[in-house]
Image (spheres, rainbow, N blue to C red):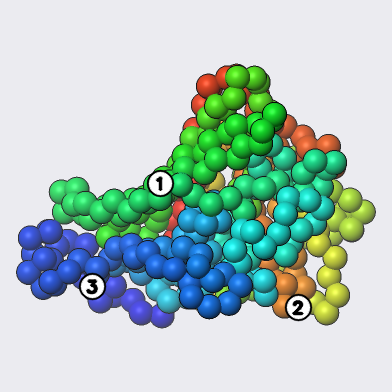
């Protein structure tokens, strides 16, 4: 692990000083969009974001502007499942088809009218993560001596004779930052009331995730989803090594109602931590997914409007043309 002045060379430089050393700021930081030209994700758009502080992540405009790979100073943070990145049309919104397209990544957004197990009209976790983004854009600009990198787009979930919901997503970071913020505004564009369900499926993988990992949650109450989870309730914050046979364990938490609610996943062995801050008065439910199987090694920490149950708990009613805005702030650091 590199420490010392070499990792902070850019922090005290002005824009004028820094630009004397480079012909294109993308040498240091920026966002670059491209299209996959091979495999099941052929023709899918991707956008790579990099900062001088060692943060890098991949945004998927054709998968709801969710985030796939994420690294900090070259160390992987997010899991990439054996499914990989696929085109959204690879599956339909029924049954457990979601799992055929579940690439994990740092963020898979679930909703917008259904989360949890399949229902009569919705597949597992709803259709959102398989929707393509419209008006996707990259905006980069200097703000005093920092260089802002901002991605924007809108995603529409609409069905004739049913919902018409738009989510406007903005992802913001900067040249000098090891953090980024996702801000979502959900608008009910139908002329009827709509029950909005939203779950931010935030995923952690190796090497951040290992038996050396510590999980810190802002929990007031914890409920196991089923008998399998109940058996592990006394050790729900312990991370196991990969198991030959592992039945997923899901826990439902109620965090403290705070404007600056935070959970933390840290690994002192590799010297890295990720903090996620959000408003738990807006997202009052928190789900934990322990999946410590061989070849399927993931921890999910999932703020949301409800718990993903057979009969989803929670939700938010939006009146016609009413909007709801919430955000997640991710901060990576050395420890």
Q: Secondary structure at mark 1?
A: strand
**Relative to 103, residue 61 above or below:** above
Mark 1 = which residue? Answer: 135
Q: Earlier in the sequence, mark 1 or mark 3?
A: 3
Which residue is painted at 86% across and 75% down in the image?
Answer: 245
Q: Quick check: can you spot residue 292?
A: yes
Label for residue 43?
Answer: none
* Residue 37 location (% of width, % of height): 48, 75
For residue 2, side relative to residue 196 (left or right):
left
In screen coordinates, is 285 left or right of 174? Answer: right
Rendered image quadrant of residue 253: top right
Total labels: the figure holds 3
Kindly identify which residue carries mark 2. 294
| Mark 3 and mark 2: Cα distance apart in space | 38 Å
Residue marked by disc 3 = 27
Q: Residue 77: horizontal and vertical position, in percent?
A: 53, 68
Badge 2 marks a residue whose secondary structure is: loop
What is the x, y in percent for residue 297? 70, 71
Say if 219 sits above or below 78 in the image.
above
Would residue 77 be visible to someone looking at this image? no
Secondary structure under badge 3?
A: helix
Proximity of marks 1 and 3: CB atoms separated by less than 8 Å: no
What is the quadrant of the C terminus in the image? bottom left
Task: Give the x, y percent position of residue 205.
Answer: 61, 69
In the image, what residue occupies the spot 7% across and 69% down? 20
Q: In whole angstroms, how far apart are the C-alphas of marks 1 and 3?
A: 26 Å
Which quarter of the figure has residue 97? bottom right
């Amino acid at each position: 692990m590199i420490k010392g002045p070499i990792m902070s060379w850019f922090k005290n430089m002005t824009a004028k000083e820094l630009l004397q050393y480079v012909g294109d700021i993308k040498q240091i930081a920026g966002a670059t969009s491209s299209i996959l030209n091979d495999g099941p994700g052929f023709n899918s758009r991707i956008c790579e974001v990099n900062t001088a502080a060692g943060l890098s992540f991949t945004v998927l405009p054709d998968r709801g502007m969710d985030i796939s790979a994420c690294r900090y100073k070259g160390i992987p943070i997010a899991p990439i499942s054996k499914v990989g990145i696929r085109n959204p049309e690879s599956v339909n919104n029924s049954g457990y088809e979601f799992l055929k397209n579940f690439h994990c990544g740092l963020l898979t957004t679930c909703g917008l009218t259904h989360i949890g197990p399949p229902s009569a009209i919705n597949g597992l976790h709803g259709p959102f993560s398989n929707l393509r983004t419209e008006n996707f854009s990259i905006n980069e600009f200097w703000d005093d001596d920092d260089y802002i990198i901002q991605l924007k787009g809108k995603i529409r979930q609409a069905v004739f004779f049913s919902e018409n919901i738009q989510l406007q997503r903005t992802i913001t970071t900067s040249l000098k930052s090891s953090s980024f913020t996702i801000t979502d505004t959900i608008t009910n564009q139908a002329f009827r009331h709509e029950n909005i369900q939203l779950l931010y499926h935030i995923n952690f993988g190796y090497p951040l995730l290992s038996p050396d990992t510590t999980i810190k949650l802002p929990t007031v109450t914890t409920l196991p989803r089923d008998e399998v989870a109940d058996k592990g309730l006394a050790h729900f914050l312990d991370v196991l090594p990969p198991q030959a046979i592992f039945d997923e364990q899901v826990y439902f938490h109620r965090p403290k109602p705070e404007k600056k609610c935070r959970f933390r996943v840290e690994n002192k062995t590799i010297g890295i931590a990720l903090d996620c801050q959000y408003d738990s008065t807006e997202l009052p439910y928190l789900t934990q997914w322990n999946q410590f199987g061989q070849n399927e090694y993931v921890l999910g920490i999932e703020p949301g409007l409800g718990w993903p149950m057979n009969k989803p708990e929670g939700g938010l009613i939006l009146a016609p043309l009413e909007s709801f805005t919430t955000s997640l702030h991710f901060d990576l650091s050395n420890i």
